[in-house]
Amino acid sequence: MPTPQNRPAQKTQTGDTAKKSFTSVSQGNDHGSICFGQVSADGAVTSSILLQASDGRHSIALDKDGPRKGATQITAPGRISIQSGEDKAEAEDTLFINALNGNIDIIASNGKIRLQGTDIELIAVGDGGTKGNIRIKASETIELDAKKVLINARTMYKLASAGSAEIIANSAMTIYSSIIRGVTDGCANQDGKCGGKDFKRKNSR
């Protein structure tokens, strides 16, 4: 039977920067282990608690110092599932992730990111002209498919294409504005009577 051990936990890193722990305690068997005060392999970080399965890639680490001070790391060679809210109502918040400072990164290096719900809301609340933005970028296609697509711009909106553009309504189309202007490439060399050359130059790529 495995027994707790008190032993110095100093790893391969040399010099004064290597972490040391003289009160490290661990217990485990061929199925897994738990260690209090484990020093990382490079000697840079001490874990307050390190829980490992028989596969070392399957672990939970609560790091206390070094470059990962205060970090909680959960790794798994397979799937990680989080489930909550079985006893709650639809309108209640039952899974909460809050980063008080810093970014939240969700990355699928070789797969898709899916968001599914009865409704999906994206809200940006930053103040000033450089915050409060939602940006969507795609290397190929952004596709919107819905019964209704409603866009409400309080100040300005712009649709631009370096190639072709189409606006199609199979039933009826209504365009309203206090002033409607149409500018063609014919004003590239000589401006029209109502102008247009500056608009062409501004929007040409």
Image (cartoon, rainbow, N blue to C red):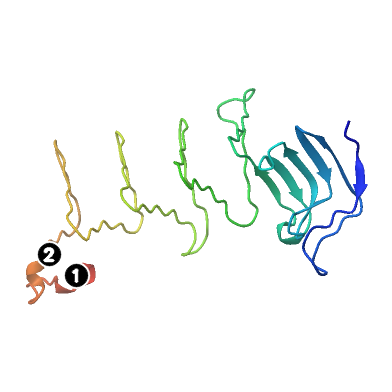
Amino acid type, residue under disc 1 in the picture: Phe
- Quadrant where the image shows the C terminus: bottom left
Above-or-below relation of 133 to 170: below
Decide which of 66, 128 is in the foreground and name it: 66
Above-or-below relation of 118 to 121: above
Q: Quadrant of residue 191?
A: bottom left
Which secondary structure lies at badge 1?
helix
Decide which of 142, 35 is in the foreground and name it: 35
Residue 58: % across, % down: 67, 39
Q: Quadrant of residue 60?
A: top right
Which secondary structure lies at badge 2?
loop
CA gap, disc 2 and disc 1: 8 Å
| Residue marked by disc 2 | 183
Q: Is residue 129 left or right of residue 151?
A: right
Q: Is residue 180 left or right of residue 98?
A: left
Decide which of 95, 139 is in the foreground and name it: 139
At a point 91% along the width and 39% down the height, the residue shown is 4
Above-or-below relation of 118 to 151: above
Q: Is residue 43 left or right of residue 135?
A: right
How packed is label 2: few (under 14 Cα within 10 Å), some, or many (20 or more)?
some
Q: Are marks 2 and 1 in contact (CB under 8 Å)?
A: yes
Amino acid type, residue under disc 2 in the picture: Val
At a point 62% along the width and 23% down the height, the residue shown is 86
Mark number, residue 178: none
Mark number, residue 199: 1
